[in-house]
Image (spheres, rainbow, N blue to C red):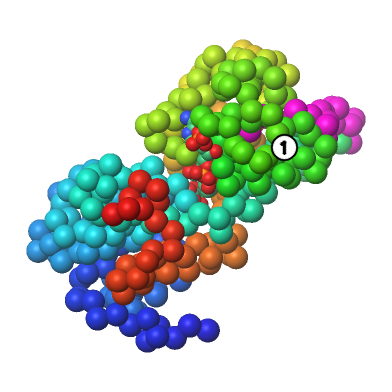
Amino acid sequence: MTNPSDHASPVAPGSVAQAGPLLPSLQRTLQDEYSVVRLPDDVEALDPEVASRVRAVVTSGRVGVSTVLMAALPNLELVANFGVGYDTTDVGQAAARGIRVTNTPDVLTDCVADTALALMLDVFRRFGASERFLRDGAWESGGFPLTRRFSRSTVGVLGLGRIGQAIARRAAAFDATILYTTRRPVEGVPWEHVASAVELARRADVLVVAVPGGASTENLVDAEVIRALGPEGYLVNIARGSVVDEEALIAALERDEIAGAGLDVFAHEPHVPQRLMRDDVTLLPHVGSATHETRRDMGDLTLANLRAHLAGEPLPTPVPETSTV
Ligand code: NAP
Ligand code: 8YV
């Protein structure tokens, strides 16, 4: 059991701020140890006096520290992001101003990969749809239609980083053939690198998206990639909604150009288009890392980064863009 006073830092009141909602246990610790200041959602409403005292902002991947918010915090030194994805934080501005950004890699990898497997199994086998069929009483009138075998399928992993590799290892246990696409082939893995997302989709039974969000991957999975999956192919996205052209996906589903999709993330969360509420689509409300154990570990790592920064110690998990700051 950690005693908050073990970490007591001589930080001035108002130094640590919070942007957006946080895990309640993390918020309580921030309150107890630093009397954390909650920043207003509307940057216009931020009192310049309050803003000038802020040295560190704790936020989540869903909210982040935007270009405008960062610009309004003249003495900001650290953004501690709860989540591995930090596409909502302006890392370019952070690097230019010498602001450090941290995230929570590795601790969530297993849960997110588990979620990807659950989505893949569900879209192939339609367990969710078959359970709805049973609950609706339809079984009395006949069996559920046959589905598709996931074991021994070909799984195309788009982005073979921490999470992509954990997905590939799990799918390999189902005797799947694993193919992957990254900008640079990954050394030391037993799986075939495929040069482009279109080629990957063409060769795979299911394309599972595990790249970071942000400008460099926006709509990487576009109409051409989706169509390349073909009428027997599935799309699974546990990365960010911004990576997939959602309109193109809906159009492909409506024209039966692909077989179905499993989605944990969406373009405009928490809004999910009504047209995606289809029987051949499995939808989850961004729960990839949402277990007690993993969220606790993410909270601990977020705090460890904040405490290290305030104590002048090396950061446990700085993001690459600001790691030399
Ligand atoms: P990571 O270790 O940094 O892996 C990212 C992978 O994507 C790398 O293999 C990278 O390889 C590849 N990549 C990047 N840009 C690419 C591009 N344009 N084309 C092809 N490949 C590209 O990150 P991670 O820890 O696995 O996390 C991945 C993402 O998952 C996070 O950024 C976050 O957005 C998402 N996520 C979602 C949830 C959820 O709840 N659903 C939870 C956690 C994370 P190259 O650099 O060689 O291209
Ligand atoms: C979190 C995530 O749900 O780590 C990420 O990138 O998407 C998830 O683990 C999110 O960051 C919390 O806001």
248 over 317 or under it: above or below: above
Name which residue type carries label 1.
Pro
Front-most of 259 and 300?
300
Relative side of 84 to 90, left or right: right
Front-most of 124 and 278?
124
Residue 4 spot, x, y in % from top left: 40, 83
Q: Residue at x 37, y 66 (%)?
A: 314
**On the rendered image, what quadrant is the C terminus found in?**
bottom left
Relative side of 16 to 162, left or right: left
Q: Main secondary structure of the magenta part?
A: loop
Relative side of 60 to 135, left or right: left
- What segment carries the magenta color? 140-158
Relative side of 268 to 117, left or right: left
Residue 72 spot, x, y in % from top left: 15, 51
Question: 10 Å neighbourhood of mark 1: few (<14), some, or many (≥20)?
Answer: few
280 over 212 or under it: above or below: above
Q: Residue at x 27, y 63 (%)?
A: 56
Label 1, secondary structure: give it: loop
Q: Dividing the picture into quarters, in which one does residue 46 lie?
A: bottom left
Q: Quick one: which residue is furthest to the front in this view?
A: 187
- The residue labelled by disc 1 is 190
Could you tell me if residue 91 is visible in this image? yes
Q: Quick one: which residue is furthest to the left in this view?
A: 49
Q: Dividing the picture into quarters, in which one does residue 157 lie?
A: top right
Q: Dividing the picture into quarters, in which one does residue 200 lie?
A: top right
Could you tell me if residue 280 is visible in this image? no
Residue 138 spot, x, y in % from top left: 82, 34
Q: Residue at x 45, y 47 (%)?
A: 85
Asked if the magenta segment contains residue 217, the reply would be no
| Figure disc tally | 1
Q: Residue at x 40, y 30 (%)?
A: 216
Residue 198 spot, x, y in % from top left: 58, 18
